[in-house]
Amino acid sequence: MDIPNVVCLTIAQELDIPVEHVTAESDSSNLEKWDSLGQLQIIMALERKFNIKFRTFEISELKSVQTLCDRIEQLLNRQSRHADR
Amino acid sequence: MKIAFLSNYTNELIVRSTKKRLEHEAIGCEIYISGYNQYIQDILGESNKFYTFDPELIFLSIDINILCENELNLQDRDTNYRIKVSECLEALFSQVNVLNNRLPNAAIFLDNFSIDTGKSFGTMEYNSSHTVLPALHRANTALHEFVQDRANIRVVDLESLIRRYGEDRLLDRRMYYVSKCKWSLYGIEKLSELYVSHIKAYKGIRKKCVVLDLDNTLWGGIIGQDGIDKILLSNDGAGKAYHDFQRLLAGLHSRGILLAICSKNNERDAMEVLNTHPYMVLRPDYFSDMKINWERKDKNLREIAETLNIGLDSIVFLDDSSFERNLVLSQLPEITAPELPDDPAFFSDFLHDLDYFNFHSLTDDDYKRNRNYRLQAEREKSKKSFETIEDYYRSLEMTVDIKPADDFSLPRIVQLINKTNQFNLTTRRYSESEIRGFLQDEQYQILAMSLTDRFGDSGIIGAAITVVKSGTLFIDTFILSCRVIGRTIETALLSYIYDCALKRGIDSVAGEFLPTSKNEPCKDMYRDHGFKNTNGSYWQLDRDGKIECPSWIKMGAG
C-alpha cells in the first residue's frame, strides 16, 4: 500500500479540503483546519484504514504527514512480522 | 432547524457526525455547541449566547461516569452510592427543569445512563450493598419517572445502544484520556445515527406502509408446492422466527403503520394460510390492501399506492427475492426495498434496526389509523349502493367538530401540517414551536376539525391556520387528511371560517392555492365556494358571499 498517498488523501477527506493542499510536508502548523479536533478525526480514520492502533500518548503528537507515515509503516511492519511467525 | 448540543464531555465529533448525517437526509440545521462542560453555565444563562440562539431541539448528553466521578469511587468501601448518585441526579434534573421552563417550546433529549465496565465490582457486583450497577438501574428508573409527565423531554436510549453493540466496539479508552470523549469512531457513528433517528422522529419523517411478500418472507417455504401443513410457521423451532417476525409487524400495525401484501401465489392457497393457519399472526384484516396474483410486482405496488392514497416514497417493500426487489427498484426507484437477512432468525432484529418507523410521540389517532383505513374500504363499498351521492353522504351520518387548537390537538395538527400532501392548499410546513408561536399571536387562529360518522370516530382530520392582516382574513393553511377527501367536509370548515370572520366584523376572506405535484385534489376549492381569483394564486370572497355547511353534515358542539 502506498502509505503517503493514503495518509494525504485521508487528511484531505477528514479536514474537508482539496487533496492537492496536502503534501508530504504538511503538518498541523501549515494546514489551518488541522486543529485538535481534526487531529482526532485524522487519527481515527487512519486507524480504521490501516487497521492499526496508535498508543495513547502518540495520538496528539503525530501531527505531520511525515511522522504519521513513519509510524504507520513501523506498525504495519510489526504486524507483518507477527503474521510471518 | 436550530439544534443545541450541551454536554459534560467533549462531544464535537459526535455533533459533526450528526450534522453530516442530517445533511445527507436533506434536513437543514443550524448548530450550537456548549463549551467543554459549560452546560450548567449555559442552562443557568450566565451568558446570553445559548438562550439567544433559541434552539428548537436540545440534546443534553450527560455521561454519568463523569457526572458522578467522585461518587463512583471503587476504593471507598463506605461510599453510599445510592444517596450520592441520587443527589447528582437531582441536581441534573433541576437544571433540566430550568431549561424546560426557559424554553417551553423546545424538545429536550436526555441520554440515559450507562456505567463503564472499569467501574464495576466484578464478581462482587450485585453481591454487596454498595456496588454500582444497582445504582445505575435506579438512575435510569429515576430518569424514566422524571420525563413521564414532561411531554417536551425525551430519553435517548444510549444504554441499549451500548448493550447492543458493546463497549469494546463503541468506546475507546485512549480517546477519553486524549480528548475527554470516550467514544470510538464506530461509537461516534452509532450515537449520531441514534440522534438523527430522534430528529427524524421529531420531524415526523417515517414510512407509512410495509408491503410484504408471502413465501419465504412471512412464512418459510412455498405454499403452492409445500402445502399448508409443510410451510415453516409455528410456535417453536425455525418456524417461530417467522411467527415472531409477524408479531413485530403486528406491533407496527398497532402504531398506525399500514401493512399490505404483494405476492405471486394462487390467491386461494395464500388466503387459506392467512385465514386458517394456527400460527399466522397477520390475518386478512391486518392488511389494508392485498395483491396476490401473477402480475408484475411493480404494477401491483403502483396500484397499492393508489388504493391507499400514499406516495411510493412512503412504502417499504420486503421480499426475500433479489430479482423482485431489483425489478421493483428499477421501475419505481422511490420505493425502499432493503435486502432481508438470509436467515429468518434475523428478520426481527433487521426490522427493529430499520430507521423507518420511529415516533417522537404517539397520538391516539396513530393507534386508530389502521381501523380507519379499513372503515374507509367499507365506506367505499357502501357508496356503490346509493342512488345519488347526496343519499350516500346523508347515510354516513357525519358530525364535525371545529375547535381552536389546544394542547390535546396540537401534536396531531403538527402531524397533519407536516405530512399532508394532497388536500393541502399551500403545503406550508411548520414545526410545533412555530405553531405554538402563532398561538401566542392574537391575529392568528388555528383550528382543528374532527369527524365522527356511522362507522366510528376518525379523530382530527382537518386543520386551518388563519391570520388577520389589514382587515382581511387570510387562510394561511388549509388541510384535510387524505382519508376524508371527497366527502364535502372542506365545505364545513370553510363555511365555519367564513362565518366566524363575518361575525368578527371582517369584510373579506382570502386564500391561496399553491400547486405542487400532489395537491391537485384541492385545486378548485376556492373557485367551487364562490371565491374570486384576485391575483395569481390568490382567491377572495367578500361580505356579500355565502358558504353553507352541507345539510348532511352536522356541526358538533364546538
Image (cartoon, rainbow, N blue to C red):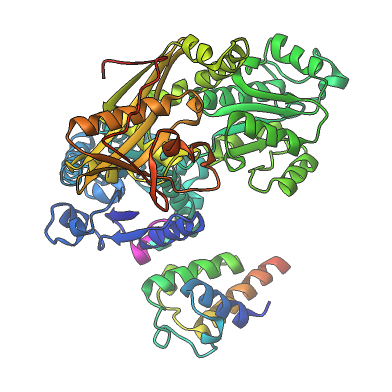
In this orientation, does residue B2 appear? Answer: yes
Q: Position of residue B29 (x, y in %)?
A: 38, 58
State the image quarter where residue B121 is shown. Answer: top left
Q: Which residues are magenta?
A: B176-183
- Residue at screen point 54% across, 78% down: A71
Q: Is residue A15 above or below residue B45?
A: below
In this orientation, does residue B10 appear? Answer: no
State the image quarter where residue A10 is shown. Answer: bottom right
Dividing the image into 4 quarters, which one contains the N terminus of chain B?
bottom left
B510 on left or right of B213:
left
Q: Is residue B484 above or below residue B423?
A: above
State the image quarter where residue B544 is shown. Answer: top left
Residue at far left of view: B46
Magenta highlight on residue A76: no
- Residue at screen point 54% across, 24% down: B253
Q: Is residue B474 above or below residue B544?
A: below
